[in-house]
Image: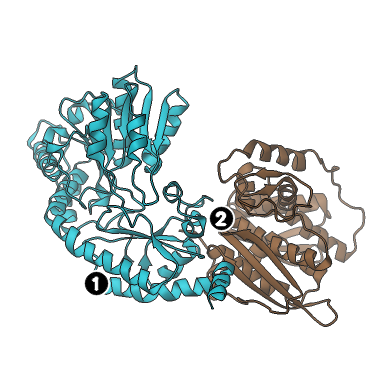
Chain colours: A brown, B cyan
Amino acid sequence: MWDYTPIVKDHFLNPRNVGDIPDADAIGEVGSLACGDALKLYIKLDDNKDKIVDAKFQTFGCASAIASSSALTEMVKGKNLDEALAISNQDIADFLGGLPEEKMHCSVMGQEALEVAIAKYRGHEAPVHSHDHDHGPAYPDQEGTIVCKCFGITDIFLKKVIETNRLTTPEQVTHFTKAGGGCGGCIPKIKELIDEVMGASPEEPRKRPEKLTNMKKMQLIQEVLERDIRPLLWADGGDLELIDIDGAKVQVAFRKACAGCASSGNTARMVEIKLRDLVAEDIVVEEVSQ
Amino acid sequence: MKEIYLDNNATTKVDEAVFEEMRPYFCELYGNPSSMHFFGGQVQSKVTEARVRVADLLGAAPDEIIFTACGTESDNAAIRSALEVFPERRHIITSRVEHPAVLTQCRNLTQRGYRVSEIGVDGAGRLDMDEYKAAVDTDTAIVSLMWANNETGVVFPVEEAAAIAKSKGALFHSDAVQAIGKIPIDMSTSSIDMLSLSGHKLHAPKGIGVLYLRRGTPFRPFMVGGHQEKSRRAGTENAAAIIALGKACQLAGQHMEAENTVVKAMRDRLQDALMTAIPHARINGGGAERLPNTTSIAFEFVEGEAILLLLSEFGICASSGSACTSGSLEPSHVLRAMGVPFTCAHGSIRFSLSRYTTDAEIDTVIREMPPIIAKLRQMSPFGREHLKAQA
């Protein structure tokens, strides 16, 4: 049995915003019956065509697909289109208190439907895949070639998901996109894409900035936690959440395998060293149980 | 919450009488059956009794029974043995719908130079006998075909298939894990050489299996070491579990008729009621001969994991052929081999009953299932489109 969080269970058993919006401004459809999950997202904008005032969904899929769709509709309401576009699949998973890694593709599907809806509203195509075994890509004009024939997934889409989620193994790519989960024939190609995205763009060695405004500092702390620290914890089945930043004091709470772990003190020190390294040298990391 | 357990093809409850039978063999009668002293000897005599009980259920002789740790071990041992016995034969035949215990091993063997033919099935899950007949040749070392399918309950004509294998000098093994205890099996009139059985599928505990090995069949052991099981399976006997399995086989023989009348009637009532109440559903393997306790029903436009979790809210335990339940991404290889369309494969639910199933439990499922499917279809874009098109 999957270890779903109470929030996932709640959004599955009592999904919010199921249905359709007859006069929707934007509709995003991804997935297919063949793939085993599909999502149709409806978005309604305010009179200024700026803020999302309503969102509804229909989903064919497992509990986490339904919960991810429900979460997404709750998250986008009240946001303008650019803010909505900034929602990542990890944000959806976080909103739900986390998803089993094997189920991360459900959150990706949500993010993707949103992107398609907004792109179509703005009159251009999004880098999506078709999920369609029979009919080829849903967006034939889009550039890119199909990598995973079983699930109809293009290199462009894969590169995007690899980059946003900083995926390092083909197995992770399968969990996030399904690619490689059918016949497995494309796994070597997926490895190449990972190398291309994660290896070929070596980042300049990052350095601690000289001076930071408070706002910038907070942003940077969040960025380092997301990019450098949480993926390390995920690898061991753990996670952390940023609770508060007060001057140089950063409060974090450990989740999943890290919660109550005897060595969480060491983990907190590791976080502190990393933050001192990349943000500011006076940072103090405190573990709170919340 | 009290469970309504309709997942007996996954595992079964240990019968209380079975548990009582094995109970003394942990803390009191813990001797090693191989020991020379009286203390081991009394365990030895119970193991012998258990061997007779298992043999009786199968219509076999006691020395044809080899105790193993599980069905998977029995399957592995049978296939490995045949390949060692016939080193010059390089061909294996199995089916596309076998349990992974057989299929994975066969596929691995292709990497060691063996030719493997996976025989297909028709839309009802029946073995393609023409394809099978054409595949058997004098290079075939072993044919391994399941007696009954775990997902659909479809029964294969294993006796007929065994006779064909025999005519080419090949050994014949059947994974009978799902069939034993549910339908009568008589090895005394059979030409099957080897048969696998698993204790936990017939109300014995997990961790005990049997490989039936016909007298005179050449055999090379999978596990080597001590002299246990006449040197055909080394390792100290799991005496308590063996004794439990003996009791479970005795009880299975006694309940065989009820399994095929009372249990079958409940299964039929369940599937008839669900098929009547729920449109756009189909019985996987409905057109074939099936086990009396199993029904696999495909509900279009919805996904299996979601159905299972909603059923679980009512304490109802079933299983699904959907991809999402297993963490794999493709729906069941059995349903795909049967050509079940994708519209249905993801929404297939298997109910497997046992002699413990009650009419009241079946009533609960008949009551709760239709609203669950309706709720999910209302949520599914495909279900809604379909409902709209109909309206």
Picture quarter with the N terminus of chain A? bottom left
Query: Label 2 is placed on what type of residue?
Result: Ala
The correct choice, above or below, for A80 with respect to B346 in the image is below
Q: Badge 2 sits on which subunit?
A: A
Q: Residue furthest bottom?
A: A47
The residue lying toward the viewer, choosing from A225 and A138, is A138
* Chain on which label 1 sits: B
Q: CA distance from mark 2 to mark 1?
A: 36 Å
Task: Pick whichever, B281 or B55, lies toward us.
Answer: B281
Crowd tier of the residue under label 2, counting other residues whose Cα lies within 10 Å: few below 14, some 14–19, many 20 or above: many
Mark 1 Cα within 10 Å, few/some/many (few <14, many 20+)? Answer: some
* Depth check, front residue: B363 or B31: B363
The residue that label 1 is drawn on is B359
Q: Tell me which residue sits at (69%, 79%) in the image.
A: A22
Residue B150: x, y in percent? 33, 50
The image quadrant where one finds the C terminus of chain A is bottom right
Task: Write down the quadrant of residue A202 in the picture.
Answer: top right
**In the displayed image of the protein, which residue is found farthest to the top?**
B88
Decide: is A90 above or below A19.
Answer: above
Q: Secondary structure at mark 1?
A: helix
Q: Residue at x 63, y 65 (%)?
A: A39
**Residue B304 spot, x, y in % from top left:** 47, 61
Answer with the quarter of the image where residue A204 lies: top right
Give the number of the disc on residue A34: 2
